[in-house]
Amino acid sequence: MNYLGKFGIEFNPFVKNSKEIKVEFTQSKELLFRLGYLEKIKGIGILTGEPGVGKTTCVRHWTNTLNPSLYKIVYIKQATLTVNEFYKALSDELGLDTQFSKRKNFKNIQQEINRLQIEKKITPVIILDEANYLPYSVLNDLKLLLNFEMDSRDRFILLLIGQNILRNTLNLKCHEALRQRIVINYELTPLSPEDSRIYIDTKLKEAGLAVNLLTDEAYNQIINYSNGTIRIINQIMDKALLILSAKKADIIDQDIMLSAIDEFSI
């Protein structure tokens, strides 16, 4: 990527392990506002959206704003867990010794949440990613975990992230008790054409770009092809920067962008 230095670009901002760049667009601002409300009220938050629209990234930006002396982040992505595996994973993330018994793990988790909230004034933030894959048995137990001896106050924040089918699952009658505890329910959709361009420009600018790098035709092509899906934008832009460097070109034009799209679609 040394060739990109001539444009002021210090690193490729579109690869997964590059420096984290926060891009604010219309939906992300609204989502962060709602997550801020959940932060104050506690209870359950639901975030849905199709793959690649930036759900996990937006949540990561939100958790980065939380004071670690007031909030404990617990992130679990292994969504195809049995109930006992879920309790073991949650126990482990809370720093507890895991037990073979589901009942003991459940009791220890509730006691630890109580201790954190009442004694330490720390609110656990439990994030279950890919929650659309959670079995009904785990969803049923979540409502038990939320109940603290008839206490109507929520002791922790539970955020379920998943594809849109998660909404259909939670609308089933068997999950009525869980649904009643939902504080926010937000669907993240693909970026608009305007926000897609803002996303690309912000990423390049934060990486050091000092000049215009894409023609209008190139913008139109990647925006139309990606349909606003952030993951697709990232992958195509990564390939476009690689082709730009290989050709030692001065700008990403229509031909370079078409080549990048062709490579992506193979």
Image (cartoon, rainbow, N blue to C red):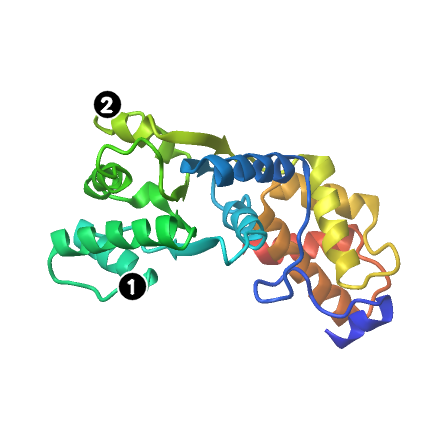
Residue at 56%, 51% (x, y): give it: 231
Residue at 35%, 34% (x, y): give it: 153
Residue count near mark 2 (Cα–Cα under 10 Å), binned few <14, some 14–19, many ≥20: few
Residue at 83%, 65% (x, y): give it: 249
Quadrant of the rendering where the C terminus is positioned: bottom right
Q: Is label 2 in a helix, a strand or a loop?
A: helix
- Between label 2 and label 1, give the one nearer the viewer: 1
Camera sees residue 255: yes
Q: Nearer the viewer, residue 63 or 210?
A: 63
Numbered label attached to residue 173: 2
Residue count near mark 1 (Cα–Cα under 10 Å), binned few <14, some 14–19, many ≥20: some
Position of 223 compared to 107: left or right?
A: right
Q: Quadrant of residue 263?
A: bottom right
Residue 144 at what x, y percent from top left?
A: 22, 39
Pick whichever of labels 2 and 1 is earlier in the sequence. Answer: 1
Above or below, 21 against 141 in this view is: below
Camera sees residue 129: no
Residue at 62%, 54% (x, y): give it: 234
Q: Nearer the viewer, residue 163 or 234?
A: 163
Q: Quadrant of residue 209?
A: bottom right
Reading the image, the residue beneath label 1 is: 92
Tell me how many marks there are.
2
CA separation in Å, label 2 and label 1 = 31 Å
